[in-house]
Amino acid sequence: MQPDRATPDRIGTLSPDQRSLLRRMLSRGGVDPAKLPIPPRVGRDDPLSRAQEAMWFLNHLAPDSAVYNLPSAIRLRGPLNADALHAALIALAQRHAILRTVFESVGGKPRQRVIDDARVELPRVDAADLPRGDASVLEAVERAIEASARASFDFADAPPWRATLYRLGDRDHVLAFVHHHLVWDGWSIGVMVRELQALYAAARVGEAATLEPLAASYGDYARWEREWIGAELLEHRGRWWRERLRGHAELRLPFDRPRRTEPSFRGAVEAFTMPEPPQLAAALEQL
C-alpha cells in the first residue's frame, strides 16, 4: 500500500500484524507512520491514549483529587431560551463521542466506552438564591463554579463533565462547565463555543444545525496511537533524546522552601514583565 493511497477505510481493514508490517515498511522507506490517516472505529470500546492513561492512573492514586478538572464559563447577555440551550448541549454531546464516553477498568486496565445516547443535564440556578453574604451576585456565582470544579467525577458512572446555567437576571446568564482533562483540553473550548452557537441558533427555531461531519473521534485517535505509535517507535524516539541529552548536567531549580513528598496540587500564578535587555526575552522565547 502506497502512503498516498492509505485511506482511512483501507487502513481500517488491515489486521494488527498487517499494520505492524506496513509500519516497518514505511519506516524503512523514510515515511513517518504518524502521518497516516486515522481510520474510524469499528466498535464502541477503545483503549485510552497515552496521555489519557497517565491521567487515569494519577486519578486512581488520588481519586478525590480535582486537579485535572477544567472549569470554564460563558456570560450570556440578552434573551435566552434555556430549553433550546439544553437541546444544543445534547446535540453537541451526540456529535462528539468523547462527551458521551465513560472510563472503565477491564482486567485492571482502563478502557473508554461510548454511550449511545447523550446524558446531559443542565441544572438551572437562580443566582439570587446562592449564599453570598457581603459578596455580589456575580461573586457568588464564581464561588459556586469553584465549588463545582473541586468536586471529583466517577469516570465509570457517567461522562466526566457537567454544565450549570446560572440566572443573574432576565437577560443575563452564566453558562458554566467543568470538564475533566480526560475529555477536554484548551483547544476544545473554541470548538465548543463555535458549534454550540450554531446548534443553539438551530434549536431556537426547531431546526437541525448544518455542521461539517467529523473525520474522526478521539477514540479513533487513541486506537490509532496505540497501533501506529507503538513501543518500538517510542523506544526509538527515547534513544534519540537520550543521545541528545547525554553529558548534560541535571537542572536543579532553587526552590524557596522544601517541597512535600506528596504534592498538594495547590499552586498560584504570578504575573511579571521581563526586564531589559530584550535579548533575554528573545532567547527565552527561542528556548
Image (cartoon, grey):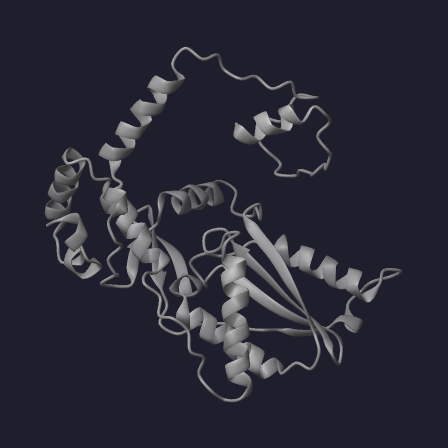
| Relative side of 72 to 251, left or right | right
- Left or right placement of residue 130 versus residue 68 in this view: right
- Determine the image quadrant of residue 248: top left
The residue at 32%/61% (across/down) is 216
Image position of 285 with respect to 18: above or below? above
Instruction: Please state the total of marks drawn on the protein image.
Output: 0
Image-based side of 270 in relation to 282, left or right: right
Residue 13 visible within the image: yes
The answer to which of 18 and 258 lies nearer the viewer is: 18
Position of residue 150 measured from the top left corner of the image (x, y, whole percent): 63, 52
Please tell me whether residue 173 is drawn above or below residue 204 in the rendered image: above
Where does residue 269 sit, x and y in percent of width and height? 69, 39
Please, which residue is most extreme toward the bottom here? 206
The answer to which quarter of the image holds residue 135 is bottom right
Locate residue 217, reporting x and y percent: 35, 60
Does the image show residue 261? Answer: no
17 relative position to 40: left or right: left
Q: Residue at x 64, y 24 (%)?
A: 280
Q: Which residue is the extreme one toward the front?
A: 278
x and y, in percent, of residue 192 in the image: 51, 64
Query: What residue is rendered at 45% in x and 69% in y?
Result: 93
Please determine whether, in this image, residue 81 is positioned above or below residue 58. Answer: below
